[in-house]
Amino acid sequence: MYYTVLIAIICNFLAAAACRAGDPAYDYVAGWLKPPAGLEHMGNSHGEIAVDSKGLIYVSVDGDGNPAGKPGIQVYRPDGSYSHNVPNLPKTLHGFVIRHDVIYGAVLGEQKVIKATLDGQILMEIPASAFPEEKRGPKGLKLTSVDVAPNGDIYAVDGYGLDWIFVFDATGKFKKVFGGRVAPYNLSNCHKIFIDPRYEQPRILCCDRVNLRLLHLSLEGDVIGELATGLRRPSSASFHGEYVCIAEIAGRVSVLDKQGRTVITLGTNETSGEINTNKVEPAQWHEGVVTSPHGITFDAAGNILVTEWNKNGRVLRWNRKQ
């Protein structure tokens, strides 16, 4: 344990020292999240984290096979105290985003996409039957992520399935499909996708996990190029100004600029058996050291919130230095 913490401290110190003037720096916030009353931990976290316009923090908690506790989306105040659960939402939300205070979610267990208000009113569902049958795979859809473009088009990815990216209009009508495991995309576990707003023309950022890379596509599906390679199984992303933060499930959080240069890494874990797994027990957790980052978001101030793939549930926080 001593060497795990020491190595993490050294890695994070070297990463901080490498920052250029003007690049962001962060302080870890220990003991930030307070689980709902009666629960020692928040529950099986295998999803995403997002922030609304009021600063409330939304975390998806998986209830598939483990309905005890408070599965669905738990909502926390900025100080980390539990507020409430969003009612009426499915218990197997995997990836979701909040855009203009509307939730768009990929429901892994129910093979559908939902659009909902922050108070749980379902505005629209895109069922499995709306996806082209020939692209669904022998075991059906395994939808892992969804985002919405400026024109209202909805993009969903079959990231635990065949890696196809499906496009629907704002009403839920199917438009097109691209991506997959074939050239020129060659995706492999395209875990989550996001509309990257940092460029003159918004584009899709693919967290192509097995290929250890971030891939940019146009909104029409054309390959723009690789933003970064050699990552630790990138699993999620969020944008703030010129920067993107990346949850890397193999034991790291990274912040990159628009050119794909890593400006800082956080929470690095080098210990085999403590990364890329959801079985790390709380007794093995180390403050400021990640295990399996799975979801990530910036808040409005540029602070970083990370939810891990963990059967007990864990959220870490780094505040941006002013």
Image (cartoon, rainbow, N blue to C red):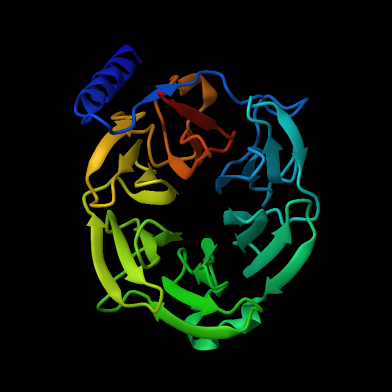
- Above or below, comparing residue 319 to residue 199 in the picture: above
Furthest residue in direction top, as rendered: 2
Q: Quadrant of residue 207?
A: bottom left
Residue at 65% across / 33% down in the picture?
Answer: 42
Q: Nearer the viewer, residue 21 or 297?
A: 21
Q: Is residue 151 left or right of residue 72?
A: left
Q: Residue at x 70, y 39 (%)?
A: 75
* Quarter occupied by residue 120: bottom right
Q: In the picture provided, is 313 more to the left or to the right than 68?
A: left
Q: x, y (%) of residue 58?
A: 64, 43
**Quadrant hosting residue 16:** top left
Residue at point 47% right, 45% down? Answer: 294
- Residue 66, x across and y down, in percent: 69, 45
Instruction: Please tell me whether residue 230 is drawn above or below residue 195 in the rendered image.
Output: above
Q: Quadrant of the C terminus?
A: top left
Classify 183 as above or below 21. below
| Camera-side residue of 276 and 224 | 224
